[in-house]
Amino acid sequence: MPSHDLRLPSLDALIAFASAARLGSFERAAEDLHLTASAVGKRIATLEDRLGLTLFERGPRALVLTAAGREYLAPVEQALALLAAMPQHRRTAPTRQRLRLCAPPTFARQVLVPRLHAFAAAQPQIDLEVVLSTPHLDTPAPAADVEVRHAVRGLGAPLLRDLVLPLASPPLMARLPALTTPAAMLAHAPLLRTPIEPWAPWLAAMALPTREPETGPRYVDLGLVLEAAAAGQGVALARPALALPWLRNGTLVAVAPAAQADRWALASSASYQWIVHVTGPAATALGDWLHACCRETEAEALAAVGLQG
């Protein structure tokens, strides 16, 4: 049993003392220990106060151990070496896990990549590789451990609510007659076309002629559709979550009048889904993070266009 009058110094103070003695200054010890010089100085001052000894002569150029400091340093270094040698104090380096994720280009660029730094910080042991699929082209998707796929519902776990509604640039809307109804938009606004998000289902839901537009720019990439809409080329039928960067800076807005956004919105026939091909802790961690990321992104984007989250 230890004596009641035994007052042991903190391990942090001993480490700071040994580092400062070895390097000759609080500043160098601070760099070595990833602390501030002030923090190192306070730890050593606390140690000196507890011991009732002056361990350093604090000169203008360098720290110099006092006789008491030199006498104290040797057993401190021995004690620290013994503690460092104990296997219980050695943390096994985490096993690195490689994970290959395949995702559609627009989802990867607008939702995934801007937020990946947060995942890397939370899961530093996972080495993530991101490859892109090419929807609606005769090219098979790259092999991957996990996948975000834009497809008919039911293949995997949904990531977004996948509501679509018309978005356009404010300058385009200023040039056109007031687009207060879907019929007015169809009559006056150029519609941007993509096979990934056809207009026919939305037109049918609005009780309008369901013939797919036959003129105007056609893009086989949702990101290009959004870029074209932001450039004023026409109206895009798009998911707010994918358009969030443009909604944030005001280069895209909902065509629907503010109080009618829910009437202009439609659930897309396809959805972004999370599909796991190779199970494991890394896939689970990424899936949990990505679902949370999508919920946050979607909530902000829906609010930006006047829809309920």
Image: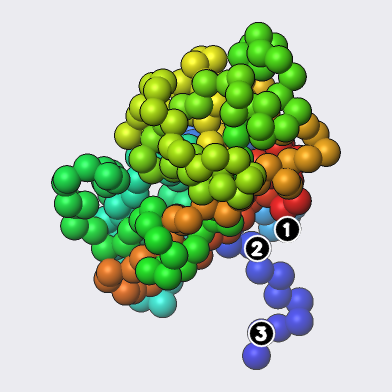
Expressed as whole percent of the image width and height from the top left, the position of residue 45 reads: 70, 45
Q: Amino acid at mark 3?
A: Pro
Q: Residue furthest top?
A: 175
Quadrant for the N terminus in the image: bottom right
Q: Residues within 10 Å of mark 3 (few under 14, many from 20)?
A: few
The earlier-in-sequence mark between 2 and 1 is 2
- Inter-mark Cα distance, 2 to 3: 14 Å
Q: Amino acid at mark 1?
A: Arg
Q: Residues within 10 Å of mark 1 (few under 14, many from 20)?
A: few
Residue displayed at 38% across by 43% down: 196
Expressed as whole percent of the image width and height from the top left, the position of residue 116 reads: 45, 45
Which residue position holds label 2? 9
- Residue 29: tell me if it is visible: no
Q: Is residue 14 above or below residue 91?
A: above
Residue displayed at 60% across by 34% down: 166
Tag 2 and tag 1, C-beta contact below 8 Å: yes
Residue closer to the observer: 307 or 259:
259
The earlier-in-sequence mark between 2 and 3 is 3
Expressed as whole percent of the image width and height from the top left, the position of residue 254 reads: 67, 31
Question: Looking at the rendered structure, which numbered label has been put on residue 2?
Answer: 3
- Residue 141: tell me if it is visible: yes
**Label tally:** 3
Residue closer to the observer: 96 or 137:
137
